[in-house]
Image (cartoon, rainbow, N blue to C red):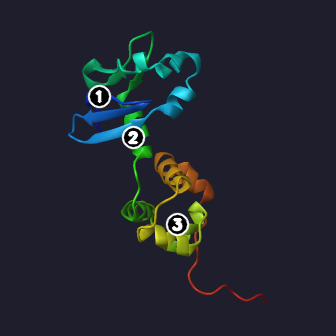
Amino acid sequence: MDMPRIKAVTPKAGTLLDIEWQNGTRSSVNLIGWIATGGDLLAPLKSDAIWKTATVEDFGATIEWAGEDLAIDAYHLSQIAEDQRSYTGEDLTKWQEELGLSNNEAADLVGVSLRTWKNYKAGQEISEAIKIILCASRRDPLIMHAHYRPRTTGRPRTAA
């Protein structure tokens, strides 16, 4: 995987950043969760005056703010952007195909009914919980290994 590089950043109101990546794509990223869990180190980013000082540094490898140790690297920023983007039925289909799951197995794995899974794939808005599961299972295959239960084809055997 190529390391992502930032071409330009525009700080927006609150904790939003508009990012232009060197590959030509764009992302809008909300760093509220990152700041909220960063304790005293990231607390200065709650100030609008500091927030507006965001600049691209290190040849696109980081975004830095005025102050001491206020920075985020491009890799983690790109991961946050990917996790925050909207997901479509096509994204679910791609994920399902990557893992080689049937519709029933995919629905079982994410904890929804088969009907809900099919509705998501057909265009129904996808819940945040499902997006989190998809992102986490892509990033860490052990999540799938721990929770996947394969289905067998055919009718269950009758008890003897």
Residue at x-position 51% and y-position 48%: 136
Q: Secondary structure at mark 3?
A: helix
x 46%, y 50%: residue: 138
Q: Residue furthest right?
A: 160
| Spot occupied by residue 140 in the image (x, y as percentages of width and height) | 51, 46
How far apart are the two marked residues, 2 and 1, measured between alpha carbons? 13 Å
Residue 107, image x and y in percent? Answer: 55, 68
In this rendering, which labeled residue sits more in front, label 2 or label 3? 2
Residue 81 to residue 156: above or below: above
Residue at position x 53%, y 33% from top? 33
Mark 2 vs 3, N-terminal side: 2
| Residue to which mark 2 is pinned | 81
Quadrant of residue 8 within the rendered picture:
top left
* Residue 101, horizontal then vertical, whole percent: 48, 68
Earlier along the polypeptide chain: callout 2 or callout 1? Answer: 1
Q: Callout 3, which amino acid? A: Ala
State the separation of the CA atoms marked 3 and 1: 37 Å
128 lies left or right of 14: right
Residue on which disc 1 sits: 9
Q: Quadrant of the C terminus?
A: bottom right
* Residue corresponding to mark 3: 106
Q: Is residue 160 above or below residue 37?
A: below
Q: Amino acid at mark 1?
A: Val
Residue 69 appears in the rendering = yes
Q: Residues within 10 Å of mark 2 (few under 14, many from 20)?
A: some
User: Picture quarter containing residue 23?
Assistant: top left
